[in-house]
Amino acid sequence: MDIFDTECGRVYLESENEVTYEPPTLLFFSDLIAVCEQVARRIDNKMEMYASKKPRMPAELADTDAGKWYSSLRAKTSAAEVTTHTEWAAEDDRSIAELERRLAEKAPADRARELLAKKKHVEDIVQGIEDHLIKLSDENCRRILGLKKDKLIRHEAAQAVATKAFSGAPLDGIGTEAWKLLWEHARRYSEGHAYPGQVFPHLATDAKCVLCQQPLSVDARERLASFEDFVKGQAEKDAKAADKAFEDAMTAIGDIPTDQAIKTKCDAAGVACEGGTAPIVTLMEVLRQRKAKLLEVESEDDLPNVPNCTPLLQELKKKASEYAEAAKKYQEDAASDARPQLQGQLRELKARKWLSEQRDAIKVEIERLQAVDRLNEARRLTDTRGLSRKKGELAEELITDAFVQRFRDELTALGASRIKVELVKKRVDRGHVLHELRLANAGSGTLRDILSEGEYRIVSLAAFLADVTGKLQPAPFVFDDPISSLDQDFEEAVVLRLVRLSADRQVIIFTHRISLLVLLQEYGKREGREPKVTCVRREAWGTGEAGDTPLFAKRPERVLNALLNENLARARKAHDEQGQEAYAPLAKGICSDFRILLERMIECELLADVVQRFRRAVNTQGKLDKLARITAEDCRLFDYLMTKYSRYEHSQPNEAPVALPTPDELKEDMEKLRDWRSAFVERLS
């Protein structure tokens, strides 16, 4: 259905407009373009489903290399690249902690000295462990146990010599350790107190025993001399040398630190050694036991086994190396202001850690980008520019010339050929061939500025008809007051064109102008296509209620029958059942309609439709002779009825009101008019 109204006309004249009709070839391009656009919309809708859920990186990390890589993720980012940028290890966590400590340190030189001190403590612990491991190794323990065995052998030899030398002594035990201790104490007493400056034993005649304080007999002096000879003999010297060798070997082992001493050293070195099961505590306990057992056992196989110390020593040495490295960095920090560089390294590490935490989200984002890339590629395939260009080229040959010719023909048919307006192709947009109306040979100015309102209206109507009449299938036309604002010269041409358009399609015209209705009835009758008139009213519940055809649009004899058989019947019923109050408005309406009917009866019947109101033409062909059949009686009848029923249309003085006719009176006048018409029609025939 095609509709023409004021707004539609403005579209044709004030903007680029597309031709409604298209030949099959162009229609194929239009359909193909429409399909492309529909597919493009589907793709756009699908792309909306792929909204990014990519986590937002903290703003302070965005300017790092890792942040720039993250912001530049694309569909072609490889899995290997993702792995490289999201890889994270425990060492990286330690690096972050170290950088944070370095940045938090306000006195890096002091911190470097502190770390170097810890390093020294760790190295001391390592050195102590290694020394004790060497001194208590199986090889050294085997040597010490050998010295201990040699000591025992030497003492047994010395004891054997003493036993043989003093076999006649009154007391046993000469040469034992207790005896030797007693002898040595007696030596120190004699040389220090009893006989200072005298060689022990003092064997002078007046000498006394330093133990019993009794004078020495000859036998006693000889025995004491033999005792000294024994003590200073070779066997005893060998025994003492063996003792010293063993004691020196045990002393060389040194003291094994206690648990408390170990804890103190570990605390100073920053090494954890809490609990009795700490490796270093366990090791020292075994070494203490191993040293103590050297005094008890005879073979190294009976000593406690030393645990594997390699992991412990490696860890301690690594700790010392870490201290040294950290101290070096703090020394560098103290020597120069490296804080900006350290802060950059810390941000980079934090950004990399953040990426490692978002690895799954990054993979999802890349998959989304790949899907969007595929959709974008599909979207590019729906580009209609090539199709539009081709359609424009074909439209130049298939549409434009025909459209322009139809527009010129319509201007001629509407009586507006004198208006020099041309229709030209403007451009092609997405397969839509757009045309524009403009004044021929006009340098500037728009149609609205130059044309009169009537000319503007007729040109827009011509453009509309040129457009819609090019369709292969005739669609219904709807015209909203088509002659509104038209010059009188164009009205009749427009009505005639509308009537002729109704030959092959339905034409619906909305108007409130009686003159247009009269012209439509006149030209419709002339063209053999009498219009069907429907009245559209505004009711209390809304506008657009279809009602009965107005009196001026009906044939007079039909109106008379309706008044007599329908309207008068309702009024009589109201009069008889409800009284004068209900009857009065109905009667007044009948009187008004009856007067209009009298006017129409005079135009159509008495004057044989030679002249009519709102019609310019005077129709005399085949009608003028009918006027000669009018009699004076005819004139008196219409004069009487017009006078009588005009009173109900005009106001009357309050002193002499005009009473409404009764139902019988109305019936009588209507039947009188009906009878006159019947007689007049017979008279004309």
Image (cartoon, helix red, strand yellow):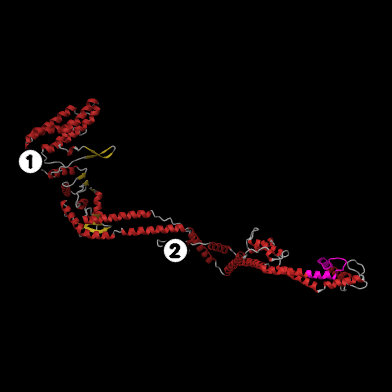
Above or below, 205 against 281 in this view is below
Residue type at mark 2: give it.
Ala
Q: Is residue 177 magenta?
A: yes
SS class, disc 1: helix
Residue span colored magenta: 155-182
User: Which residue is at the front of the view, 159 or 544?
Assistant: 159
Q: CA distance from mark 1 to mark 2?
A: 105 Å
User: How many discs mark residues in the rendered view?
Assistant: 2
Which quadrant does the C terminus fall into?
Answer: top left
Which residue bears the numbered disc 2? 80
Q: Is residue 367 magenta?
A: no
Disc nearer the start of the sequence (1/2): 2
Disc 1 residue crowd, few under 14, some 14–19, many 20+, Cα 10 Å = some
Numbered tag placed on residue 624 in the rendering: 1
Task: Examine the image and state in which quarter residue 123 appears.
Answer: bottom right
Q: Position of residue 258 (x, y in %)?
A: 69, 62
User: Which residue is at the front of the view, 232 or 663?
Assistant: 232
Q: Is residue 253 toward the left or the right of residue 54 in the image?
A: right
Task: Examine the image and state in which quarter residue 524 appears.
Answer: top left
